[in-house]
Amino acid sequence: MKIGGSVITDKSKPFTLRKHVLNRIASEIAKAIAETKIRLILVHGGGSFGHFVASRFKNKLTTTSCIEIHEAMERLNRKVVSYLLKHGVKAIPIDTISLFVLKRKHVFKAFLEPIVNALNNDLVPVLYGNVVFDVAEGFSILSGDTIAPCLASKLGFENLFYAIDVDGVYKRYPPRSDDDLLEVLDLHKAKVGVGKIDVTGGMANKLIEIAKWIKGKKVKVILFNALKKNHVYMVLRKLK
Ligand SMILES: Nc1ncnc2c1ncn2[C@@H]1O[C@H](COP(=O)(O)OP(=O)(O)OP(=O)(O)O)[C@@H](O)[C@H]1O
Ligand SMILES: [Mg+2]
């Protein structure tokens, strides 16, 4: 499950955690895990931490900006993990920069053994979008929107969930009515609009990455509104 930065932070205000939302989501995850055995990997986005710092540097990735982006993302990750632990989720943070190496912004190498071992030890790995090394460009940003479908594909998961701050993917954005919501995700019908601050391409890139990694695989993808109570729980329990 990719937990959107749009959900756990307020993307309109730098470094603003939505504590009550994060707390509720952590409790819903804990409840779902307590009730049923699920192999779960969590990936969170940058929200008003990573996206804010990266855009302050106008997306220029130098040693200085990368250190600052990484620091901001680690700070957000510590918060996410601490709320999960508080609710009894056996969360273990895994730093993206140690697992992935990119080449011209595309995943070139992925060292997934720590994740597999974490899962085999009943832990819930918590990854996050972050700066990583790029053999061609020095550094690149690897979005949580790429990490999630990449892991689902490479590790053979059956479900891929995106917790976001709107009800799903709309035919047009902003939507004019509820009828614009796509019941079944059809990438040809979705027309993306301007969203909030997002250095990794927002909704458009999310859909591109889903198509890229999931094409031809049997993976059920659900994008849902995690600002609404119980939705995280219901999705994990696969309830309507
Ligand atoms: N067709 C569309 N359907 C739904 N949302 C859309 C569409 N087009 C644009 N959006 C925007 O996409 C946003 C969600 O993507 P965004 O990248 O901001 O969130 P996120 O990925 O959860 O955040 P983060 O990147 O910090 O993890 C919505 O808030 C909405 O403003
Ligand atoms: Mg995004």
Image (spheres, rainbow, N blue to C red):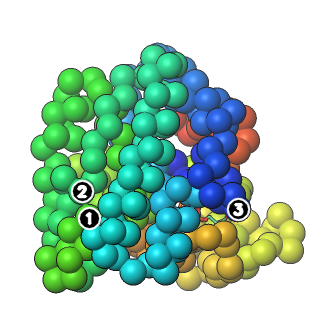
Q: Please tell me how crowded label 3 is: few (under 14), some (14-19), or many (20+) other residues with Cα within 10 Å.
A: few
Quarter of the view holding residue 39 = top left
Q: Quadrant of the C terminus?
A: top right
The kind of residue tagged 3 is Ser
Residue 180 lies in quadrant: bottom right
Q: Are marks 1 and 2 in contact (CB under 8 Å)?
A: yes
Q: Is residue 172 left or right of residue 95?
A: right
Q: SS at mark 2?
A: helix
Residue drawn 53% across the image and 56% down it:
49
Q: Which numbered dot is residue 97?
A: 2
Image check: 20 left or right of 38?
Answer: right
- Report the front residue among 178 and 99: 99
Sequence-wise, the earlier of marks 3 and 2 is 3
Above or below 8: residue 25: above
Residue at screen point 48% across, 45% down = 76
Do residues under tags 3 and 2 come within 8 Å of each other at their CB atoms? Answer: no
Disc 1 crowd rating (10 Å Cα; few below 14, some 14-19, many 20+) is many
Residue count near mark 2 (Cα–Cα under 10 Å), binned few <14, some 14–19, many ≥20: some
Question: Is residue 45 shown above or below 126?
Answer: below
Q: Amino acid at mark 2?
A: Ile
Mark 1 → mark 2, Cα distance in angstroms? 5 Å
The residue indicated by pointer 1 is: 132
Please name the amino acid that badge 1 sits on. Val
Q: Is mark 3 within 8 Å of ligand 1?
A: no
Q: What percent of the width, then of the height, locates residue 109?
A: 13, 65
| Disc on res. 35 | none
Residue 57 x, y percent position in the rendering: 47, 76
Residue under the point 28% across and 70% down: 63
Q: Tell which of 195 and 133 is nearer to you.
A: 133
According to the picture, the residue beneath numbered tag 3 turns out to be 12
